[in-house]
Image (cartoon, grey):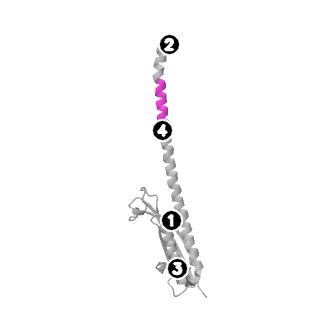
């Protein structure tokens, strides 16, 4: 009689091992999925840090080039057409320096952010010139290729967050810098 009980329990042990292997496999797949999601969020945080740095950098460049940014006869940084200017070969004017700043800034945005864009606008109030610097990029995209995802905006999104038809979200960072005019 004890021999029959041993024979019946041999198959039960094998079933326990198979169930344990299935549970462990599911747990490992879940852990791998959570790791991939954490990496995706980490990359999004890196894009945000880069955008904040780029916006603050341009605001400081505007303030550093006060003769150009606060000149009443000049439209300001928002009107600069970016073209390469070599200021290390010869002395630059303040307009040349502004052109170089915009060119370098646009290159950095394109290199560091997926579908990155930068805009600068200026508001004049008496002797104060307030520049608004906006850096935006495409984030939270489902495909591997960020650059191919620039699409049209989807209705119902909030300011600073523009969901594109390609599945990504356009996020932006805004900073302002006020420069007092030259006296």
**Total numbered labels:** 4
Q: Secondary structure at mark 2?
A: helix
Question: What is the x, y in percent for residue 6?
Answer: 49, 17
Spatial CA span between label 2 and label 3: 94 Å
Secondary structure mainly formed by the magenta segment: helix
Q: Nearer the viewer, mark 4 or mark 3?
A: 3
At 57% from the left edge and 76% from the top edge, which residue is drawn? Answer: 61
Determine which residue is flagged by label 3: 86
Q: Residues within 10 Å of mark 4 (few under 14, many from 20)?
A: few
Determine which residue is flagged by label 4: 25
Q: Earlier in the sequence, mark 2 or mark 3?
A: 2
Q: Which residues are magenta?
A: 12-26
Tell me: residue 138, above or below residue 125: above
Q: Quadrant of residue 94?
A: bottom right
Answer whether labels 2 and 3 touch (C-beta < 8 Å).
no
Spatial CA span between label 3 and label 1: 23 Å
Q: Earlier in the sequence, mark 3 or mark 1?
A: 3
Spatial CA span between label 4 and label 1: 38 Å
Per the rendering, the mark at residue 155 is: none
Residue 94 appears anywhere in the view = yes
Per the rendering, the mark at residue 112 is: 1
Q: Nearer the viewer, mark 2 or mark 3?
A: 3
Q: Is residue 32 magenta?
A: no
Per the rendering, the mark at residue 2 is: 2
Q: Nearer the viewer, mark 3 or mark 1?
A: 3
């Amino acid at each position: 009689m004890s021999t029959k009980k041993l024979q019946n329990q041999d198959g039960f042990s094998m079933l326990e091992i198979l169930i344990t292997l299935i549970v462990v496999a599911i747990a490992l797949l879940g852990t791998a999925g959570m790791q991939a999601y954490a990496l995706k969020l980490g990359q999004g945080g890196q894009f945000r840090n880069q955008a904040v740095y780029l916006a603050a950098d341009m605001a400081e460049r505007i303030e550093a080039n006060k003769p150009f940014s606060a000149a009443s006869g000049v439209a300001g940084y928002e009107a600069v057409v970016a073209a390469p200017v070599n200021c290390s070969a010869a002395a630059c004017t303040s307009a040349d320096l502004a052109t170089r700043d915009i060119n370098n800034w646009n290159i950095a945005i394109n290199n560091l952010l997926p579908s990155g864009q930068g805009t600068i606008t200026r508001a004049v109030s008496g002797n104060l010139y307030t520049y608004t610097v906006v850096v935006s990029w495409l984030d939270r995209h489902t495909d591997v290729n960020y650059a191919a995802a620039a699409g049209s905006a989807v209705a119902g999104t909030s300011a600073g967050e523009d969901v594109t038809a390609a599945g990504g979200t356009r996020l932006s960072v805004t900073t302002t810098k006020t420069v007092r005019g030259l006296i």
